[in-house]
Image (cartoon, rainbow, N blue to C red):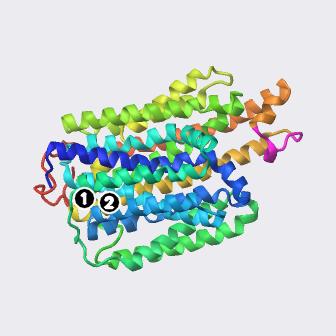
Amino acid sequence: MTLSPLRLRLLVASLLVVSFLGALDHTVVSTSLATIAGELGALEQLSWIMVGYTLSATVMLPVLGKLGDVIGPRRVFVASLVLFVAASLACGFAPSMGWLIAARVVQGVSSAGIQLMSQTIIARVTSPRERPRYMAIIGAAFPIAIVVGPVLGGLITDFWGWQWVFWINVPVGIVALTLALIAVPHLPGGAHPRFDVAGSVVFTLSLVALVLAVTWVGEETLLLSALVHFAVAAAGFVVFFVIEVRADAPIIPLHLLRNRTILACLGLSAIIGAGLFATTSYLPTYFQMAYRTSATVSGLVPIATVLGMLVANLLTGYLVSRSGRYRPYPIIGTALSAGGLLVMALLPPGAPLWVPMIVMAVVGMGTGGFMNLVFALVQSSAPASDLGAVTATTNLVRQVASTLGTAVVGGVLGFGVAALLPSTLDAATLTPKAVHAASPEVQDAVALIYHDVFSPIFLALAAVYALGIVAAVALPGGRLSDETPATVPDPQTQSV
């Protein structure tokens, strides 16, 4: 479908507002968690405010993607936005932690629908060559939310109360819904009238089991449960594969994996999840311990990383849309990130803080160079009937890789620090505040331990990005087409 320039700009603005709202909801809650747990009196269930949201958003991606192909992305998008506003209202009125977690699960599902359908709608109304620029604009919502969210959440919690962290979504969501109803065109579905119910159920249960297993494997008391869930997940994915091979309209079209572009982009998406998202989660802890910074100052390095990602994301989207050539950017990006993480591994103890800030900004720029480009490429290589499914699969690979990567890095960090700490210090009660109050000798010892534990982690993540160079080189060359989706021939058997 071809839109007028004015209608397209209004659509992009609408999708950007909605995408920012969904991305912000995940980050704005983090600074209010302690307050919420204290007022609701359920500290032991605190982690499920975030885990429930992330888990539900991840497992529903393939289902929502295929649903958009069947009934049309506009219907799924509008329904997700309405559900998101209602769930936000319910979160603020939560009288107990159980109520809040249930509402957060609904929020996660609806947020996944918002983000996924935003990407799918853009794919349906733009040409492959235009797509990287608009994907970059919409994708900018995520890094901006990472920077703004925690600060905004803290301010709202301090001055208005934690309920407004959720209620603020209601007026903004209503405005966004009004914009969406005006701007988002009616896009037909009906690609596959039969929905893969069996595949959806088995995949959802298997992925839930896998994410729970990864979440629990680092806790000694839950190790047996984690192993059982790993076994359930493995058996479930085998059954899922059998179902998908026989299904008329599978939620994850396995035949698309024969496309070289799609396969390479899925590899790049996994590397972003495992390589960057897993790193940024633990950077504040590293700098508080190894560089002895305050919590506020420790956030400067992740912010530098995100800003580098944001700049490169927008620049790459503009350049690819202008020239049509896309292959150099993932190659340069993965090489930059691999080199930056290698430098992080080799940095000596006691280096000035501005040095890792610059290095991690380079890592962010490298990743930003292809983080949203991969969506434009997979969409340009899939038939129109599978746009939602292939976009969902790309998101899913990134989410699962991020979950697994974060769990592995956290496990290595916990084990490594506990093994190297002297017997006079307890890893379970070691906090930055306690270290900063200790003697200079203890501070030096802890700083060196964290440096020695993180160095091989950075080195391993550099190797992950080095594998990404291979995936980027595997992308076929050429230019993105200027033809709109309505006139482009079915690309199922073509490369970009």
Name the residue beneath numbered marker 2: 390
Q: Quadrant of residue 437?
A: top right
Looking at the image, residue 484 sits to the left or right of residue 142; the answer is left
The residue furthest right is 424
Q: Give the main secondary structure, helix, strand or loop, of the magenta stretch.
A: loop
Q: Write the start and end of the magenta stretch as one range.
A: 423-431
- What amino acid type is highlighted by mark number 2? Val
Does the stretch in magenta take in 215?
no
Q: In the image, 305: left or right of 330?
A: right
Compared with 454, 393 (above or below) is below
> Residue 377, can we see it?
yes
Quarter where residue 422 is shown: top right
In this orientation, which residue lies closer to the viewer: 83 or 305? 83
Gap between marks 2 and 1 measured at Cα: 7 Å
For the residue pair 19 and 374, the one nearer the viewer reads as 19
Find disc 1 in the rendering and name its residue: 382
Q: Is residue 430 magenta?
A: yes
Query: Which residue is painted at 43% across and 51% down in the image?
Result: 171
The residue positioned 35% from the left and 51% from the top of the image is: 176
Where residue 87 sits: x, y (%)?
A: 49, 62
At which x and y percent is residue 142? 43, 44
